[in-house]
Image: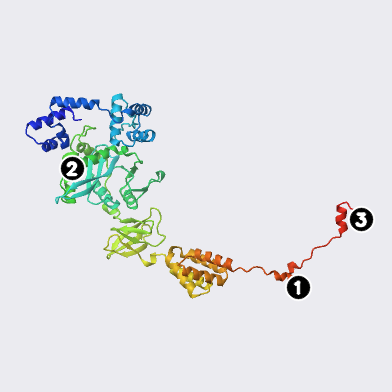
Amino acid sequence: MVRWKMYTQIYQLRNKGFNKSQVARQLGINVKTVSKYWELDAEGYAELLQQSGRRSQKLDKYQDVILSWLREFPDISSAQVMDWLKEHYKLNDCRDRTVRRYVSRLREKHNIHKKEASRQYQAMVDPPMGKQMQIDFGETTVRTSTGANIKLYGMGVVLSHSRYKYAEWSDRPLTTAIFIKMLGRCFDYLGGIPEELVFDQDKIIAVSENHGDIIYTFEFEKFKQAMGFNVWLCRKSDPESKGRVEAVVKYMKRNFAANRLFIDIKTWNQSCVDWLERTANTKIHGTTKKIPAEVFLLEKQHLKPVPNINNIPKDIVTRVVRKDNTILYKSNRYSVPIGTYKPGLELELVIEDNCIVLYHLITKEVVTRHKISAEKGALIQNNNHLRDNSQKINEFYEKTLENLGGSDNAAKFLKAIRQEKSRYVRDQFVLMNEVAKVYPSPIVEKAIAYCLEMTLHSAVDCRCAAEHFLSQQETPVDISVLDNPDSWPQYLKVKAEQRSISAYSTLLGGVKH
């Protein structure tokens, strides 16, 4: 039901000469809603409102039970109420939105509010000057000069004491190498390095939290050691511990990036530096009530000098070895030798003469070399990286064929198995060797011929066929051999000891004669 204020706006716009579509656009409502109230006068609207108030709703008959659920379980969701109605009352013809609105009205009418668990926070004293800097990342989509959209990846930085900010953007997803370059330019901008840097557990910085013994990415660890700062890594699900920089990243996206036209990344970052000096660092901070740029003049004196650029390790491009013993480079997969993969293992990637060369990070030994492919989504493999079992399988094939008698049918059968069951060819050949060992040669040959005729290219089927043919060819025992005792086997010539009848008479209590 449209409220009275909306109705009066419709009525006034109609009187000014607006048509229904114009009124709908002006008020941001559906044109059907406008049509419904277009011809109504005030009395008609009041009558419609009264009828609407008398109209019963589908869920009214469940009102008492829904209220009992809400009072007993104040945190119950409308979705769970919907599920319970379906479970206990077979209510299947009601929409989720209807239940959600009905539950909301009941909560408001009967003052039943959800008991939301609220986390308690404690205000923290600002760390000393030069002590801490917080860093975080964000993404935003902006419009380019050609009218297209582009996603930008930003790094926001804030000194925790002075609230002095730095921001930089990239038009490519952030990698460890890109981030290190950004951080280096940030130190140059600040003119020094704070004692401690606060980060989230981001994959471009840390490989594993490792129960407190944090394992950083190789490139970041070398940069960290060269620059001489400490790292505070936020625990999972605890972003509030770096709340200062979270506000900065939001400020970057809403105050600087929003509605700004993107020309190129160099121009964009220069505009961002201008924004920092014009606005972000010169406005009075809402919490400290001080101007960050003015406080920074004092804090800058407490920052450590930036080491000579020669002491900074060169950027190293690395690639993680995947479980299938490949690395990714420009949408293609390049193989490494089987057995290279270990969890978290990274290799250094160097481009040399249109080739990618992969090195061990520590030993600097060459792992492999590949020519760069111009394709996309391709798998580039070196032959010596593959499992070369062909020679062993060939030898196994020859041995199995020999055990089966070396006939043409046996060769044909083994080749069919090798083609159809290539993944299990070794197991199939093992079973065929057992068949050759257990069953007589004529039976095996007959079983192989039967399997070829019936197109049963399986060692299991061959074994079953051999078992069947053997049972059919077993000959009965010739009993005529019993008529000639001289031809009996030795175990049949054994004679049992004979006792005198008197021995049995004595046992039975008889009289001796």
Q: Residue 161: where, in percent of width, then height? A: 26, 36
How far is disc 1 from disc 2 in space, using C-alphas? 113 Å
Q: Residues within 10 Å of mark 1 (few under 14, many from 20)?
A: few
Q: Name the quadrant of the N terminus.
A: top left
Dot 2 amino acid type:
Ala
Q: Is residue 8 left or right of residue 93?
A: left
Secondary structure at badge 2 equals loop
Q: Earlier in the sequence, mark 3 or mark 1?
A: 1
Question: Element under label 1?
Answer: helix
User: Can you tell which quarter of the image residue 238 is in?
Assistant: top left
Front position among marks 1 and 2: 1
Q: Mark 2 and 3 residues: CB-CB less than 8 Å, in contact?
A: no
Q: Amino acid at mark 3?
A: Lys
Residue linked to disc 2: 258
Q: CA distance from mark 2 to mark 3?
A: 129 Å
Q: Mark 1 sits on what residue?
A: 486
Mark 1: amino acid: Asp
Res 296 label: none
- Looking at the image, is mark 2 or mark 3 earlier in the sequence? 2
Q: Can you identify the residue that label 3 sits on?
A: 512
Which residue does the image show at 40% across and 53% down from the upper left? Answer: 343
Query: Seen from this angle, which residue lies furthest right?
Result: 513
Q: Which quarter shows the C terminus?
A: bottom right
Q: Residue at x 89, y 53 (%)?
A: 510
User: In screen coordinates, is 81 left or right of 251?
Assistant: right
